[in-house]
Image (cartoon, rainbow, N blue to C red):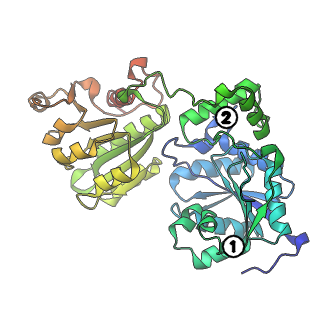
Amino acid sequence: MRPTYARENIRVVAVIQARMGSRRLPGNVLKPIAGRPLLWHIVYRLKACRLLEDIAVATSANDADEAIVEWCNAEGITVVRGPEDDVLARYAQAAEKLDADIIVRVSSDSPFIDAGFVDHLVATLIEQDGDYVMLEDGEASAHEGADPFSRRALDRLMMDAAHDSCAREHVTGYFRLHPEFVKIVRAPAYPSLARKGRRLTIDTPDDLAFIEALHARLDARAGEASLADLLLLLEREPDLKAAPPRSDYNSVAGRMSGGLALIRCDGGGKFGYGHVKRMVALARALRDREGIGVLFALNGSEDAAAPIRRAGFEVAMLRGPSDLETLADANTPDILLLDGREGPSRAELERLKRGVAVTAVIDDGHERRLAADYAYYPPVPAARALEWSGSATLPRLGWEWTLLGLNPHATPWPRRWRCWIALCASALSSAPA
């Protein structure tokens, strides 16, 4: 563990944890705000901190995060890559690479980092020779997304808490749960931000639209609008605090912005790779055209998971009959899509669909199709012969409903497709690749 610092030799760095795999807004860290990527806004504001000597981005070794690495390289920002499921290990890598004494943990969904507030916290940490800093009890702050802590605290986390899920995933959250673990010091209020504020993080398409609207209202270019400016605007115009409308389509089948789709498909081994190929095409359409996150539940072999991960999607391998239900309970998807020869029974799908806005099956002759909201088939004799009596399922038969590929350069789809299940239908009707 590192000794107490000589104040003149303390090296302070910021580490931004960033990944492309947000479920509610995939690729959010590179989404543009006022013409610049979200990550640019964070780096730009951090560069104004007087006490910071360096900045790094800590991302994962997942292929999907290569885009972050390319952006950092182009911008001259240090980047480290580590385990996807171990944020703590990535921080340890970054601290070692930058030879840090104090690390400012920065979230990648908070574009309005305030340099003065960060310096205020860091200065308090140094003055009181602390390991983690929080505001004094009862003090409010509208600021989000920055947590300074010492290298001593990081080293101790790695030695004594590296297997704790909270430490691995949330890093500084461990100090809040275990206040006796390291020396926590308290900072006084920061006057210009000493108030409760509206959440200004970017987790969904609506958040992104709201932040864009605030920039437009202030007529501010990228980097010009400070957090204090935005708080004053929201005080002057309280109607802006209302959440923006999600969509023109507000029916259960029409909520299209954000949300999560769970795709259960077969792949590899005895199944081949056709199901995976077309579901990856559909997943890309949901993510890239409508900002819907996608989680895959794969029944099959690990080799079939590789192209899904390369496309930037999370994959859970199904090992037992209850795994799909467990996965759905843990992630509460808004869309459930089934594409495979095996899968849940009709009764199991009835249970799975509770709380799910839309369920659909593809090329499925099993009785479970009778529990789905929609069912898609090419116009072949076997599909035409299927019996639907006693079911509320809406079958769609025709070549226009058949997923044969997806042209990423296709012109925008007709407005009538712009709800979730119609979006799926549009992907199914795309021309062969």
In x, y percent, where is residue 9?
A: 88, 71
Total labels: the figure holds 2
The foreground one among 323 and 302 is: 323
**Mark 2 crowd level (few <14, some 14–19, many ≥20, 10 Å Cα):** many
Q: Is residue 26 visible?
A: yes
Residue at 29% from the left image edge and 47% from the top image edge: 265
Taking the image as shown, residue 353 lies to the left or right of residue 250, namely left
**Mark 1 crowd level (few <14, some 14–19, many ≥20, 10 Å Cα):** many
Residue at 19% from the left image edge and 38% from the top image edge: 371
Q: Which mark is residue 207?
A: none
Give, as a three-letter code, the residue at label 2: Ile
Mark 1 or mark 2, earlier in chain:
2
Q: Give the quadrant of the N terminus.
A: bottom right
In x, y percent, where is residue 197?
A: 69, 41
The foreground one among 351 and 23 is: 351
Query: How far apart are the alpha carbons under marks 1 and 2?
Result: 34 Å
Give, as a three-letter code, the residue at label 1: Ala
In x, y percent, where is residue 239?
A: 65, 25
Taking the image as shown, residue 46 lies to the left or right of residue 171, namely right
The foreground one among 294 and 109 is: 109
- Could you say whether the residue bearing mark 2 is in a helix, strand or loop? strand
Mark toward the viewer: 1 or 2? 1
Residue position for label 2 = 33
Whether pointer 1 and pointer 2 mark residues with C-beta atoms closer than 8 Å, the reply is: no
In the image, residue 69 above or below residue 151: above
Residue at the front extreme, as displayed: 138
In the image, residue 270 above or below residue 209: below
Residue position for label 1 = 153
In x, y percent, where is residue 361?
A: 24, 38
Taking the image as shown, residue 207 lies to the left or right of residue 250, namely right
Q: Give the quadrant of the C terminus.
A: top left
- Could you say whether the residue bearing mark 1 is in a helix, strand or loop? helix
